[in-house]
Image (tube, rainbow, N blue to C red):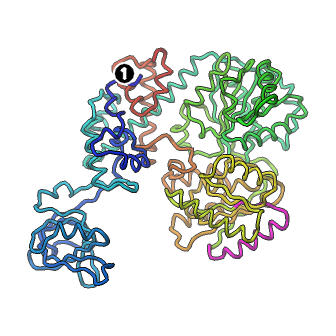
């Protein structure tokens, strides 16, 4: 149960004055549905303004507050141009206050001729004339603008204004309860941080540089502590030791010999499975590094030891693909494998359920359907989770209840994560890394081409398709505006369809799942030759016949994402090519990013470089990222503060694993505050 002291913070945002149905939507768009969210909606930046007596004291481009006297109003003849209010300062310097559109009504009301007003805004020059476009504040006396000298700027969505958000934030901050301190006293004193409620208020004012660090630290501490509680809970649970005799693994028909990294990872997994504490291991492997083979070896150890294994995939198409791949490799062993998705109905489904129940089916692959209440296992010993980041910790804890004792868990991800961030996302797991490529994987040629040469690219594409190959065409990522992404993809699809007809299919995030699956299915089966998509194309979809990847406006993507997209090709025996189409205006970072893509195919190196170049936007941003769990902490704070928070959490766990001391009780409140309460629920009687 959430502690009562937090109830004011978890009240709906509608309980704030002025929030009705009209404001609810734009607030929801920003994720601000409760008072707590509004309090934690911290400013992106601050505008600092200098109060001056006259315009001679200011320079062009500066943010100022200045007293002016209004001399005349001028509107353009057509009524379509700007509305200008002329004013002078004390020495008689003229300045034009310029308004566009409907803002002219405001100007007429706020700035009557002959009145003296205090005006806040950015001083610019237009020709010979000084001007302030859309003054941000106009007041009758100087005291009215004191609060604007250091003004927060919040991120907005359509329908919200800066004053509105600032007003809601002030209301939310007025409701903050006094909470007990959860930070270790030595750390708290060393860092000279303010108390929690003070830190939030100061962060909205931008007055105390350490305030935001304190808030980021709270979030990192909550995360570290929750993951440690998962780990401690796992250690307390009884698992079943699984030791195989190698009889089945010896019969496997693998497409190529194991790499050193694969053998090492299998050895680590084998060691974990032999323990009576359930395994919690993450297998990090680059695109094409052979994770599936490692997972299969792990599943066969379970089967050799008389247990069952289940592989969970995030989508139906990936589940089908894993099933086909595993079935081929398992053929010589005689081990039965079944596929179970939400689509299976009737007798076929009943037969699979019976087989899992009586143990005659030792390996099952599927979507989350394999963990529904109706599915019972005779002895589930190992769960393999593909694309771990699509499933939260709380979902994984749910799966663990399917075994008689807690099953071992192997999570896999094809998103290489820099070492700094592995702790943040997977602090409760041991990590194995596949950092070698299997022999025989061909390098993918990566070419950067100007967007202007798109005609040549389409001709090259036509030649590929005529030769019987398949291709992907990924459309640009328009920051934060998914509707524009989709518009760009639909326009490109329409243009390519004119040339290639029914051979083209389209996939984007707004399509209904069954339409998306049908399009992917047509492409995977070879019935469609060209797949046009936004960045939603599935991680892991394996089409060996696809040998060309075109990425439009590649400079808009992060390195990690470009690398993931490039990994969709190069899966067969034919030579593959990735064409990166770049726009004209390339930033230095953009140039460096595209150069790195040409230079290396090592996903781990690219992930580290991505972190350096963009502050982990890809890893920590909202898109396709396997979101890190953080809303407050930015990349710099994660790198600086996570090791300390991790250590602080460990200290608390060592001294007080049940969180029953005074600081432990405060830490429970922290876990609920950051909604890591699945951590608390693992405490006995928590």
Q: Is residue 68 left or right of residue 557?
A: left
Q: Position of residue 555 (x, y in %)?
A: 57, 64
Which one is in front, 648 or 301?
301
Residue labelled with disc 1: 665
Q: Is residue 621 left or right of residue 70?
A: right
State which region is magenta: 451-472
Badge 1 crowding class, 10 Å Cα cut-off, few under 14, some 14 to 19, many 20 or more, is some
| Disc 1, SS | helix
Is 681 magenta? The answer is no
Residue at horizontal 24 percent and vertical 38 percent from the top: 174
Residue at horizontal 52 percent and vertical 63 percent from the top: 589
Q: How many marks?
A: 1
Q: Position of residue 33 (x, y in %)?
A: 40, 41
Give the image quarter of residue 595. Answer: bottom right
Q: Quadrant of the C terminus?
A: top left
**Can I make out residue 413 in this image?**
yes
Q: Determine whether 77 is above or below 284 in the image.
A: below
Q: Determine whether 400 is above or below 199 in the image.
A: above
Q: Position of residue 22 (x, y in %)?
A: 36, 49
Q: Main secondary structure of the magenta part?
A: helix
Q: Position of residue 553 (x, y in %)?
A: 59, 66
Q: Determine whether 458 is above or below 195 in the image.
A: below
Give the image quarter of residue 670. Answer: top left
Residue at horizontal 42 percent and vertical 46 percent from the top: 28
């Amino acid at each position: 149960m959430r502690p009562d002291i937090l109830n004011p913070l978890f009240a709906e945002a509608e309980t704030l004055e002025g929030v009705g149905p009209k404001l609810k939507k734009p607030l929801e768009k920003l994720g601000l549905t409760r008072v707590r969210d509004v309090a934690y909606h911290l400013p992106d930046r601050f505008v600092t303004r200098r109060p001056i007596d006259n315009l001679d004291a200011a320079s062009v481009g500066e943010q100022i507050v200045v007293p002016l006297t209004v001399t005349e109003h001028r509107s353009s003849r057509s009524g379509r141009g700007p509305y200008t209010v002329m004013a002078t300062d004390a020495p008689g310097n003229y300045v034009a206050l310029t308004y566009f559109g409907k803002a002219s009504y405001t100007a007429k009301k706020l700035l009557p001729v002959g009145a003296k007003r205090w005006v806040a805004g950015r001083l610019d020059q237009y020709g010979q004339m000084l001007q302030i476009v859309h003054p941000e504040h106009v007041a009758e006396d100087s005291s009215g603008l004191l609060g604007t000298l250091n003004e927060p700027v919040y991120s907005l969505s359509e329908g919200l204004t800066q004053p509105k958000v600032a007003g809601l934030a002030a209301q939310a901050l007025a409701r903050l309860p006094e909470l007990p301190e959860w930070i270790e006293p030595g750390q708290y004193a060393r860092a000279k941080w303010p108390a929690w409620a003070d830190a939030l208020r100061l962060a909205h004012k931008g007055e105390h540089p350490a305030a935001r660090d304190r808030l980021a630290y709270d979030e990192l501490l909550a995360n570290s502590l929750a993951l440690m509680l998962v780990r401690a809970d796992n250690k307390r649970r009884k698992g079943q030791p699984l030791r195989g005799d190698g009889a089945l693994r010896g019969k496997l028909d693998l497409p190529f010999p194991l790499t050193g990294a694969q053998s090492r990872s299998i050895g680590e997994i084998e060691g974990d499975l032999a323990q009576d504490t359930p395994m919690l291991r993450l297998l990090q492997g680059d695109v094409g590094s052979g994770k599936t083979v490692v997972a299969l070896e792990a599943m066969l150890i379970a089967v050799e030891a008389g247990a069952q294994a289940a592989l969970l995939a995030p989508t139906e198409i990936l589940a089908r693909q894993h099933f086909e791949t595993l079935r081929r490799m398992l053929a010589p062993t005689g081990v039965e494998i079944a596929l179970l998705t939400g689509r299976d109905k009737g007798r076929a489904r009943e037969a699979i359920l019976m087989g899992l129940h009586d143990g005659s089916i030792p390996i099952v692959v599927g979507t989350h359907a394999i963990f529904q209440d109706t599915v019972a296992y005779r002895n589930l010993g190992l769960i393999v989770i593909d694309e771990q980041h699509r499933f939260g910790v709380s979902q994984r804890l749910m799966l663990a209840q399917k075994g008689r004792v807690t099953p071992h868990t192997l999570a896999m991800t094809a998103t290489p994560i820099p070492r700094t961030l592995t702790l943040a996302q997977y602090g409760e797991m041991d990590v194995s890394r596949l950092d070698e490529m299997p022999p025989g994987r061909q390098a993918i040629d990566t070419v950067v081409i100007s967007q202007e040469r798109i005609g040549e690219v389409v001709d090259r594409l036509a030649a590929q398709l005529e030769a019987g190959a398949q291709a992907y065409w990924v459309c640009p990522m328009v920051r934060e505006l998914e509707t524009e992404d989709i518009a760009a993809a639909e326009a490109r699809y329409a243009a390519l369809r004119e040339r290639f007809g029914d051979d083209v299919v389209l996939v984007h995030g707004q399509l209904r799942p069954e339409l998306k699956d049908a399009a992917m299915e047509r492409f995977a089966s070879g019935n469609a030759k060209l797949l046009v998509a936004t960045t939603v194309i599935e991680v892991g979809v394996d089409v060996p016949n696809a040998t060309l990847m075109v990425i439009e406006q590649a400079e808009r993507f992060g390195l990690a994402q470009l690398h993931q997209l490039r990994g969709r090709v190069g899966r067969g025996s034919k030579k593959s090519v990735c064409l990166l189409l770049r726009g004209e205006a390339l930033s230095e970072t953009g140039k460096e990013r595209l150069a790195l893509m040409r230079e290396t195919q090592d996903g781990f190196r690219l992930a580290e470089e991505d972190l350096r170049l963009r502050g982990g936007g890809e890893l920590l941003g909202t898109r396709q990222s396997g979101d890190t769990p953080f809303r407050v902490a930015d990349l710099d704070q994660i790198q600086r503060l996570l090791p300390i928070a991790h250590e602080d959490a460990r200290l608390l766990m060592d001294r007080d694993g049940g969180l029953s001391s005074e600081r432990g009780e405060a830490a429970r409140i922290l876990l609920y505050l950051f909604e890591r309460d699945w951590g608390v629920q693992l405490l006995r009687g928590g």
